[in-house]
Image (cartoon, rainbow, N blue to C red):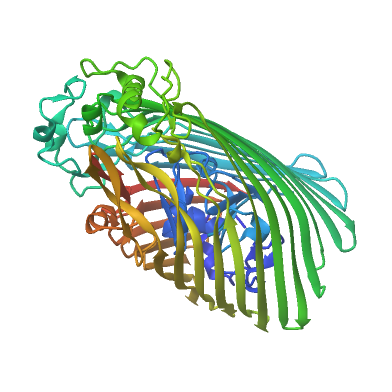
Amino acid sequence: MSATPSPAKAEDQPPELIVTAQRREQRLQDVGLAVSILTGDDLARQRVESINDLVAQVPGLQATPSPNDTPVFILRGVGFYETSVAAYPDVAVYLDQTPLTLPAFTKLTMFDLDRVEVLKGPQGTLFGNNATGGAINLVAARPQNVFGAQVSATAGRFGRAELDGHVTGPLTQNLTARLAIKAVDTGDWQRSTTRPDTLGATRTAAGRLLLDWQASDRLKVSLDLNGWVDQSDPEAPQLARMTTPADLQAAIGASGPTGTITADFALLHVAPAPANPRAADWNAGNRPFADNRLAQAALTTSWDAGTDLRLTAITSYVHYRMHNATEGDGTALADLDIVSDRAQASSFFQELRLSSIDEHDRLRWVAGAGLDRTQVYEAVDLVFPAASTGSIQGFSADTYDSHQTMSNEALFASLEYDVLPRLTLHGGARYTWALRRTVNGSYQTPGYVEPFAGSPGLTGLINTLWSSALTPLFCPGQSFTLIPPGGSVSVNTATCSAGLYRGRLPESNLSWRGGIDLHLSRDWLAYANIAKGWKNGSYPTISAPVFDQYQPVTQESLLAYEAGVKGRLGTLATLEASAFYDDYRNKQVRAKTVNPIFGIIDQLVNVPRSRILGAEAQATIRPAKGLRIDLSATWLDTRIEQYDGIIGDTMVNGLLYAVRAPFAGADLPFAPHWQARAAVDYSTRLTRRLSGFVGGSLAAQTGSYASLVGTAQDRADTTLPGHAVLDLHAGVETAQGWRVTLWGKNVGNRFYLTNAGRAYDTIIRYAGRPAEYGITVTRSWR
């Protein structure tokens, strides 16, 4: 399949879609799973440039930005909103069968692809123990044994200048290669609400070199080399409202515990941002920026050891480096700014598997073993001199870091057996041993000068509080060991001393799947599955005054039941529909805890029980020559069944304590009840050598929430209203390989939200991008 759109294809008989959802090539109609496919043509026509763009193409999928500029993916309501680099996802992403272990690795991988496969429901049997919600397979366009090349240039709104292309062909008789590159440079798309300033430039470059060597009739070796650089501006949030009460200044008085307050209480009078996708604000002194880089090498060797036995070995290594600064509070003040977020991450993956070859055998199977080793170091500098917290406590900056190592070892097997010519039973299992270690600390920021007169700084404040009031309350009979300069200020209440938190989380689990496929005909399949998936536990990367805040979430599980039908009506249509029920245990969420001094702060928690009920359908219809209609929809009904969470704090004898309430009946975050998409594409021959095409797509969804909702105020602050976004494209293509496309995204300039939440003194929200339009000129040589 081509990685670029070919409008004339809509006139032809629809191609037989081939997928690798079960780690081997199969017709889509033969795979008893819910799978959404986007070919290279689809991706280019709809300008899908990142996994975030897939949301408009795949109902059930959600992706959201975060304050740390790390992506978060949610599929059918299953996701883990944790923004640290070391957090495993609930939706695994693979590039050519190699895992992109951490969400940060996935940012610039969506170019020069043959197709994208979105596998829904637990995929742990073949794709590992961090695919509770599903898996996204990115399949790169492979080298060809004949010469081919393409180059595209794009100009668009906000000064967009984009160049991408590829060249492929044989290097020797048995060695083929493909080189693909993509570079994007744009101007700013966000505008400050308080001054003449802009933000939002895109500066990215990515490349991929693929080499396929057919060493013999039985031995094939493939080498993938990928890399990218991202120096784009992280998105700044909008201010939705202030959480600071109007009488805060009077309540605190003119001075705080350490002297005169100099914090800027203009925060009390900052106006919310208008409902405009371009409106935002940020601290000009801590302007958001990014300098993130990734390099990957993957080697895949396939050897046919016999007439029906294949040995496959996959080895991959990824190195990632991140340095960015992000706006946290949505104002021009330094109320909550991440002025530096540095991370280094590396991941090694090895898999060996044996499989049968002949697809016509009654028994088809695959078995193997895999391991991965991932290391992440992340350090964050946070400043908040304008925040009420800093004003009250007398400090306004802190630094925290985390060094985490994760290892996973697994054995897996999967098989299919044709009981009857039209009846197939299939099943599989994966047993995983996992170990995560962490070393965490929180510190007074080196070299930072507090703006408050007489401030003791963070270290001095912790020493003062624990040397006097706190020690008798939390570790009676002991004395507090003073924190030396530069030491971690996180206190272990068991020893009444501060230092580094060291944690070790060993876990093991068994993912499994069983199902039945009934082949109603060659082109129609009915299926039913039951599957159990697991996601490893995790430690947070946060600022923590006490060790309790560093406690991990343990592994979560999902038991999924699903039944569906899929098939095609000749050349007229392909159809797929399914219904599912998920029993969700120990869901991992980033929620809140209460510190007696500092109040509500972040912590990872497990939600004991939730459930998800849903149905989805998708269809591609070709009612006339050159006309294609795509329709798809997902319905979800999610509910928390057991969880008591923190909804606030209360003061008792000078200390703060948590106020809890049951969350039973609340929706899961980022799980709209309805998502739907409709797309129409039409192409026709204008002259003997010229074809024309026109098309558009409308993606819509109902409202959802960006976090767990425990109160009416939570509901108001974290609601993501429903919306619909329209994209359009039109152009011409010549028989000589030229194509000109006019395109527009969000052409109605619809204002909609992708995330919202609390940032101490402010409620912030992230807006979707405004209307964008441009022209793309492509030249192909085939």
- Note whether 523 is above or below 250 in the view shown: below
Tally of marks: 0
- Where in the figure is residue 21, as x and y percent of width and height? 64, 62
Q: Residue 118 appears at what percent x and percent y?
A: 55, 60
Task: Name the residue furthest front.
Answer: 477
Q: Image quadrant of residue 396? A: top left
Q: Position of residue 605 (x, y in %)?
A: 44, 50
The reply to whether residue 593 is in sight is yes
Whether residue 252 is situated above or below residue 135 in the rendered picture: above
Decide which of 168, 713 is in the foreground and name it.
Answer: 713
Query: Which quadrant of the rendered structure holds the N terminus?
Result: bottom right
Whether residue 35 is visible? no
Residue at the image position 35 percent from the left and 52 percent from the top:
744
- Near-viewer residue (661 or 129): 661
Rendered residue at 71%/66% (across/down): 428
Q: Taking 82 as reference, is 722 left or right?
A: left
Relative vertical location of residue 360 with respect to residue 181 in this rendering, above or below: below
658 vs 294, left or right, is: left
Question: Which residue is rendered at x = 82% and y = 63% of the image?
Answer: 356
